Each structure stands twice: as structure tokens, then as C-alpha cells.
Amino acid sequence: MADSRVAALAEGALMAALTVVLVLAGYFIPFLQVITNIIWTVPIVVLIVRRDMRIGAMATVTSALAIAFFTGPLNAVLLFIQFAGLGLVYGYLFKTGAGPGRALVAGGLVSFFSTFLSLFVTSLVTGLPLGGILQEFEAAVDHTLDFYRRMGMLEHMARSGMNPEELQAALAGMIGFLKLLLPGILVTASMGAAFVNYLVAARVLHRLELVKEGPPPFRHWQLPWYAVWGVIAGLALWQAGDYYGLPLIYKTGLNILYIYFPFLVGNGLAALSFFLYRLKPGPFIKMLILFAALINLPVVLFSLATLGLFDPFFSNRRRMNPSDKGE
């Protein structure tokens, strides 16, 4: 019993050290931060699955204290607020054998809550209210114009036929669009972080033989049929808000559609990969398809989203090959 406890504590210390290394690698090598910020929780997930939640929580706190020593308390607190909860939740869900759908939904909710909490803490520390962030976006237009003026770029644009007023209007339109979709951007970023973290953790656990099955092949990923109702709700709110002049309803519908768009594109891409797997085209045809997609990217994205919308509703892939479980 004592030996088992010592082994668990030693493994917890090792995983905490690995977590610290991953975080510090992103902190001192900035271009790695996008990757390390998402995957540094994987050692915690592995530890919880191998041992238990208590050891995982202890390793998380220990690594947080070590990281605070190197990066400062504020950086450590913000980092762990944003991602530590995700690692603990995924560890528990993998430990209990939860399915991918349940794990991804729970992970997405935890990630969104953690992102909002991180913004709230940042607001408290800086003294800038959350609404002030939007005002900073608006001030960025004036800062950009001033930068262009000092660099002499406004004169060059004027010779090309664009005056400062038109540039200011274009920048203001971009900022306004960003403000409109800010809730959707935050939700999408949170869901994306949770999704990548789940995939990496599932792959690692499968490689270590801590879970029986890894993620299914990409061609078998599919949204449930009732996901269609979210798109319908978004379209209805968007059109109703526009028709009746209700800004909040309009923004809500638009943000729902924005959140759904990457899921629909991903689902459409999975369906396309399934059909290509069945048809088995040659390398030349694949390269031709890729080239055509790159030069017509907006059309391709819209087409994939449309395919992703109708694919789960009609269950095309299940009807074509219901027994195919993937190789």
C-alpha cells in the first residue's frame, strides 16, 4: 500500500515536471505557445486516468506553483484558469469511459467558462471593464490611421484611388463586424481548444493503452441529425431580428450561425473524405481537387458547409456503408 502511494506521488511529480516543461517552452519560445497552451494539460489527463483525480489535482497545483516562480503569479493564474479545468474534466471523463460526444460537449462548456473567467480576471487586474475592450477596438482605427500617416502610406493609397475617409470607413466596418461576432469568436475559439485538446489526449491515451479505442477515422466523424435545428434557430433569429429591427435577436442569430459554421465545414470535409475513400481517386485527381479548392476557397467552404448541414440529416454515409467501422 505504501509502495503504491509512493509510486503514485512519484508519477505525479514526473507529470507535473513535464507540464512545467511544456508551459515554459511556450513561454520562452513564443511561436510554440499556440501549441503548448493547448497540449500542456495532456500529462494531467494521463495521470488522472492512470491514478486518480486527487493525484491529478495535486500535480496541477504543484505545476502551477512552479510556473508562477518562472513566469510570475499573474501569468500562471491566467494560464491555469484557462486550461487546467479542461485537463481535470477530460481526465475524469476518460477515467469513467465517457463517449466522445459527451466529453466534447463538457470540454467545450468548461473551456468557454474558463475563457470568460480569464477575461474577467484580466479585467479586474487591469482595471479595464469588459466593455472597455470593445472601446479599445474602436480606438485601434485611429491608431492605425495615424501609423499609416506617419509611414507615408496614406499618400501612396491616395495615388491608388483610396482616400483616408474611405480607409477609415473600411477599418471601422471591420471593427464593427468584429464587435458583432465577438461572442461567437470566443465560443468558437474555446470549442476549438477543447476539441484539439481532446484529440491529442485521446491519441496519447490510446498509444499508452490506457483506453480501449482511440478517436475514429476522420471520414466517420459526423454531427448528430438534431444539429440541424441549431442552424434553423440561428437563421430564424437572424432573419427575425433583421425584419423586425431587433438588434439583440439579430446578433444572437448571426453568432449562432458563426459558431456552427466551422462544425458544418468540418462535417462536410469528413463526408467528402469518406466519398473519396470509397472512390479511391489517383494522386493526380487529388492534387487537382486540392488546387481547385485553393483557388476557389470561399465557394468551397460554403459548399462544404452545405454538405455538412445535409449529411447528418439524410445519413448518406450510414446508408452507403453501415457496417464500415474504419480500418
Image: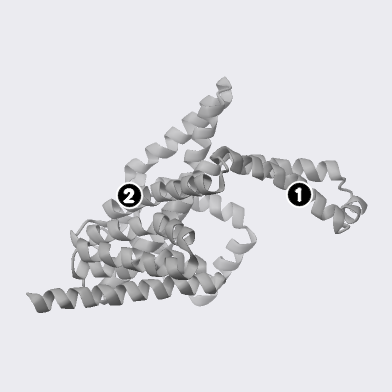
Task: Measuring from the top left, give residue 162's x and y in whole percent.
Answer: 86, 47
Q: What is the crowding at mark 1: few (fewer than 14 residues within 10 Å), some, or many (at least 20)?
A: few
Q: Indicate which disc, 2 or 1, sits on the residue closer to the N terminus.
A: 2
Number of numbered discs present?
A: 2
Q: Identify the image quadrant of residue 278.
A: bottom left
Residue 109 at x, y percent in the picture: 36, 47
Q: Amino acid at mark 2?
A: Val
Residue at horizontal 37 percent and vertical 66 percent from the top = 65
Relative vertical location of residue 289 with respect to residue 266 in this rendering, above or below: below
Q: Which mark is residue 44?
A: none
Q: What's the distance in space between the residues labelled 2 and 1, CA to CA?
A: 40 Å
* Residue 21 against residue 239 in the figure, above or below: below
Is residue 281 in sight in this rendering?
Answer: no
Is residue 201 shown left or right of residue 297? left
Q: Tell me the element at label 2.
A: helix
* Residue 154 relative to residue 65: left or right: right
Q: Under tag 1, what secondary structure?
A: helix
Foreground mark, 2 or 1, reads: 1
Answer above or below: position of 50 versus 108. Answer: below
Residue 203 vs residue 275: left or right? Answer: left
Residue denoted by label 2: 105
Q: Amino acid at mark 1?
A: His
- Looking at this view, is 40 or 27 the one in front? 27
Q: Quadrant of the N terminus?
A: bottom left
Give the colour scheme shown: one colour
Q: In front: 109, or 7?
A: 7
In the picture, the quarter occupied by the C terminus is bottom left
Residue at image x 29%, y 77%?
14
Residue 49 visible, this orientation: yes
Residue located at (42% from left, 73% from top): 22
**Residue labelled with disc 1:** 143
**Percent position of residue 251, x then y:** 54, 33
